[in-house]
Image (cartoon, rainbow, N blue to C red):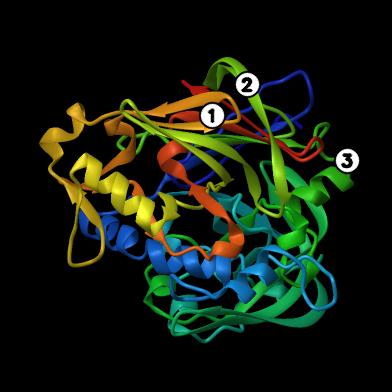
Amino acid sequence: MKTTFFLAGLLSLAVASQAEMTRITLKKADLTPAEKMAAYSETGSYMAQKYFGSPTRKMNADKAQQIFGLDADGKPSYGVPLSNYMNAQYYGEVNVGTPPQTFSVVFDTGSSNFWVPSNHCNSIACFLHRRYDSTRSKTFKANGTEFGIQYGSGSLEGIISNDNLEVGGIVIKHQDFGESVKEPGLAFAFGKFDGIFGLGYDTISVLGVVPPFYNLVNQKLIDDAVFGFYLASADGTTGGQMTLGGVDSNHYEGDLEWHNVRRKGYWEIDLSKISLGDEEVDLEAGAVIDTGSSLIVLQTALAEMINGQIGAKKNYAGQYTIECSVVPSLPDFSFFFGKKKYTLTGEDYILNAGGSCISGFMGMDFPEALGDLWIVGDVFLRKYYSVYDLGKDRVGFAIAK
């Protein structure tokens, strides 16, 4: 089962432990400077859509309570798990069906469903991507349940199907997944990836579909209910690696520091404090660790304050930009997860998009009902190797190498 399976994108995830596991090598999306700027400019609407099921950056308290609490039937409801293609930089390949049909997917800890375009889809976006054809697969089983995901100018619509799914050389049998038959908007048409491979908790899975990682565990295809991510640097030529069933000590220094999940939906942990330079602010917040997001997303007022302190100014597209020449002199920014401090330098939290430097801190209007919430994406995860332990409901970090 120690199989190496190469994927397309700039993400490097690696695994090595005494348990059986698999290594999945990922690469980075090859975006032009203009595409990078477009990706970051769409982050606000993407994050609101992904976490709140709304194309705007705002939502009311009642909706927030429903999403992060219980629905009318008393069941957990966490919103629509949909990632924006242009925003994600790391992706890889999986195979569906027998014989295998290959798709590029975003490995996303901020959602829980697996979906790919269907050959029944007539949207322009689908014709520009690989599409699943159930008639070509001997292991396909029809389900036919319809699903719909609201997205900006329209909705992503499709049906649930069932087939074998191969990831990292491991075959998951009878995996339910989404076949999209309608994909709206240019973000889908120009996206670098075909679909999404969700790695969040099953509580946020649309229609209660069992996520692929749960089936890896349930079918005893891996020894430990653990996966890890190593993300290569943004300007590097290599990608990264994801590990299923273990972690790779070759990709981090020292020991892993563990933090308990505070709310089982996203991989959300306690954030007790932040610091910028010599100034510290105590918090009672949650930090969602999201491999499918490029930036760090926080309350708008606090984002404006941090960006003001580092000298970043908002441009016409709503991005905070800064002169690239000052980046080496910027103050350190630190997260405190529990009592453990994790520090980012200016070079870590400022993104260079072909000579234009963009702040990695983006504001969003989270409802008061949610409390203080941060979404921690690749800006942080490139510096810190991350491990997700489903068996013990915890997240681990160590300095990546």
Residue labelled with disc 3: 220
* Image location of residue 249, percent across then percent down: 61, 18
Residue at 77 percent of width and 57 percent of height: 202
Q: Amino acid at mark 3?
A: Lys
* Image location of residue 66, percent across then percent down: 69, 71
Note whether 133 is above or below 76 in the view shown: below
Residue labelled with disc 1: 385
> How far is mark 3 from mark 2, CA to CA?
25 Å
Task: Give the mark nearest the N terminus, 2 or 1.
Answer: 2
* Image location of residue 159, percent across then percent down: 71, 80
Callout 3 crowding tier (Cα within 10 Å): few <14, some 14–19, many ≥20: few
Residue at 58 percent of width and 29 percent of height: 14
Residue labelled with disc 2: 256
* Image location of residue 175, percent across then percent down: 79, 60
Q: Is residue 163 shown to the viewer in this render?
A: yes
Note whether 341 is above or below 244 in the view shown: above
Horizontal side of 284 relative to 309 (left or right) equals right
Note whether 161 is above or below 106 in the view shown: below
Q: Amino acid at mark 2?
A: Leu
Q: Nearer the viewer, mark 3 or mark 2?
A: 2
Find out whether the residues at labels 1 and 3 contact each other: C-beta distance under 8 Å: no
Task: Give the mark nearest the N terminus, 3 or 2.
Answer: 3
Q: Amino acid at mark 1?
A: Tyr
Horizontal side of 6 relative to 179 (left or right) equals left
Find out whether the residues at labels 2 and 1 contact each other: C-beta distance under 8 Å: yes
> How far is mark 1 from mark 3, CA to CA?
25 Å
> How far is mark 2 from mark 1, CA to CA?
9 Å
Callout 1 crowding tier (Cα within 10 Å): few <14, some 14–19, many ≥20: many
Towards the viewer: 231 or 362:
362
Callout 2 crowding tier (Cα within 10 Å): few <14, some 14–19, many ≥20: some
Towards the viewer: 397 or 23:
397
